Amino acid sequence: MSTLAHTMMTAARPVDSGLGAPGDLDRYPYPEAPAGRVGPPSWEGVDTDLGRVGRRPAGNRGRGLHGQLVQQLGQMIVSGDLGADRPLVPEEIGQRFEVSRTVVRESLRVLEAKGLVSARPNVGTRVRPVSDWNLLDPDIIEWRAFGPQRDDQRRELNELRWTIEPLAARLAAGHGREDVQQRLADMVEIMGHAFAQGDGITFSRADAEFHSLLIQLAGNRMLEHLSGIVTAALQVSGSPVTSCDRPSEACLAHHARIVDALATGDAHGAESAMRQLLTVHPEVERVVPAPREH
């Protein structure tokens, strides 16, 4: 071990990190830090309970200690427990969470790929500011959705959707695929029947299918991919994925207007109807003004 690395090492208190029993881990033998040494900020006060937030199955982000450490550190960074420019000493992390050097190294690489940390020679690994994060990364979306930035995450997702879907409606009007347009009309009919019968589940499923078909009809693969990310993120954040917070006659009418505009190739009409539809959504209405009729 180099003198510099030895000097930067900070002793950590033995804690129950929730990552497994000490005897089950491939532990790297970290030496004790000399008394009185000044090192990076300690982990004092950091909550290490992995079960404190909802999250996707571990298989979605990697199994075992590696996946759990990525989850834990990612949550701590996104929540602000580890602020921007905070130094992350691998030896300290390994001792704090009772994992091997390999697990720490691989976990930091994953976080670096997400833009959460940076590693540079002679500087070490540090937390990066939020402006550098990959905010469309599924894990970061989830960590924000279950952290103190929950409200901002939902608002930003709905604003992004309000930007994507009117554009998709305008593009879809120029493609004229009668088969897809018929399926869109079928979804509106199903929504109408479900509304009359008080069947909110069927209504929501048809609504979600309507918007998925519309994005496909736009013929823009990048737009489709981005819309898929937003939809998945809304599911994680707990926001309604559909355009209507609850079934209503106004919601049905806006869907029907979109179908009519697509059938006549009216790009402006389709875009305007989509904006009106999304403005019905209460979370969007708070942040996006209603569109003007021309």
Image (cartoon, rainbow, N blue to C red):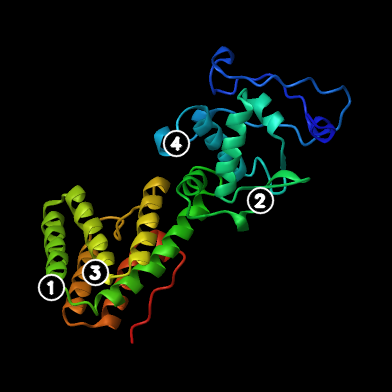
Q: Give the number of the disc on residue 128.
A: 2
Question: What separation in Å lies between label 3 and label 4 (alpha carbons)?
Answer: 34 Å
Query: Which badge, 3 or 4, is on the more N-terminal residue?
Result: 4
Question: Is 254 placed left or right of 26 in the picture?
Answer: left
| Residue lying furthest right | 36
Q: Which residue is mark 4?
A: 54
- Give, as a three-letter code, the residue at label 2: Arg
Mark 4 vs mark 1: give the one in front.
1
Give the quarter of the image for residue 45: top right
Question: Is 180 placed left or right of 136 in the picture?
Answer: left
Query: Which badge, 2 or 4, is on the more N-terminal residue?
Result: 4
Quarter in which the N terminus is drawn? top right
Mark 3 vs mark 4: give the one in front.
3
Question: What separation in Å lies between label 1 and label 3 (alpha carbons)?
Answer: 10 Å
Q: Give the number of the disc on residue 217.
A: 3
Q: Which residue is mark 1?
A: 178
| Residue lying furthest bottom | 294
Give the quarter of the image for residue 103: top right
- Give, as a three-letter code, the residue at label 3: Leu
